Amino acid sequence: MKVYFHALGMHLKSELEYRANFILSFLSQILVFFTYYFVILALFTKFDNIKGFTLYEVLLCFSIIQFGFSFNEVFARGIDQFDNLIIRGEFDRLLLRPKNLILQSAYSEGDFVKLSRLIQAIIVLVIALRHLAIKWTVMKIIALLLMLLSSCIIFFGIFLVSAAYCFYTVQGLEVRNVFTDGGKHMAQYPIGVFSKGFVIFFTFIIPYAFVNYYPLLYFLGHNNNFLYGLSPLLVGIYLIPCILMFYLGMKRYSSVGS
């Protein structure tokens, strides 16, 4: 982990060499993020609720998903941009180092501009919590922390699957955006507002429902089953096949001879 944080520090240092560009990019990301936020606000100017979920309940769901996605964009950017390692032939260099390949891939690139999105997600989270009448208990605090943690884990897993896809082809990579950016935009709303088929798919195939739907029901008091509050732990199981898929895909990698 010492090497990981050292690499992140080097990426940050390199980005700050061009401070004006960094600041302008940072500000632009703030504007991009709040377009998502204002879309939800605009939606609730026409509707009081979406299948029983109020504005601040949806914003809580939104902030949890955005937190996990932004966290990975900052701290696992190399896996999100894994195709660059393959295209440039830099994955060979990682194979020669006596370090974990997933960890090396994660810190191979950095993008601290996206830190603005992570900060904004936390701000929206605080705003939502301030406007919700939550009856705080130890279990609900645990449920909230598990939702945030599982959000980070699920996107890390999806990024790993996308990286595994790059071992087979670096063409048509827009397909993976269906599950990364597309999944993020869909999961920023409670999964239960969608049709039954979507709920089943995003519960048992890509378990967004265990990130911010079932635990959200418990956290908001819509369901008193404490197992719903612990359901984000199941996302950790989802990470196992994602890691296996990455290493399975790696077996198909052919060195570029660099």
Image (cartoon, rainbow, N blue to C red):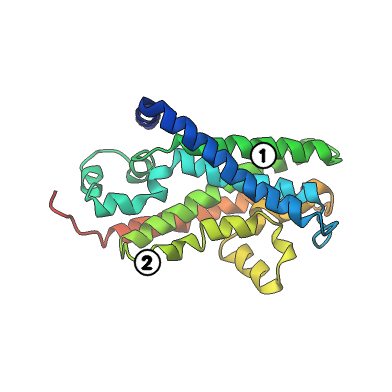
* Residue farthest bottom in this picture: 197
Tell me which residue sits at (84%, 54%) in the image. Answer: 222
Residue 34 at x, y = what percent? 64, 44
Residue assigned mark 2: 172
Whether residue 69 is situated above or below residue 195 in the rendered picture: above
| Tag in front: 1 or 2 | 2
Whether residue 14 is situated above or below residue 89 in the rendered picture: above
Residue assigned mark 1: 145
Q: On the image, which quarter does residue 20 sit in?
A: top left
Residue 223 at x, y = what percent? 83, 54
- Residue type beneath disc 1: Leu
In this rendered view, identify the residue nearer to me: 28 or 138: 28
Q: For the residue labelled by badge 1, is the local secondary structure a helix, a strand or a loop?
A: helix
- Residue type beneath disc 2: Gly
Q: Are marks 1 and 2 in contact (CB under 8 Å)?
A: no
Disc 1/disc 2 C-alpha distance (Å): 36 Å
Q: On the image, which quarter does residue 176 sit in?
A: bottom left
Whether residue 166 is situated above or below residue 150 in the rendered picture: below
Residue 195 at x, y = what percent? 71, 71
Tell me which residue sits at (39%, 48%) in the image. Answer: 79
In this rendered view, identify the residue nearer to me: 252 or 195: 195
Tell me which residue sits at (23%, 50%) in the image. Answer: 88
Q: For the residue labelled by badge 2, is the local secondary structure a helix, a strand or a loop?
A: loop
Is residue 61 found left or right of 243 in the rendered image? right
Tell me which residue sits at (83%, 59%) in the image. Answer: 47
In this rendered view, identify the residue nearer to me: 200 or 23: 23
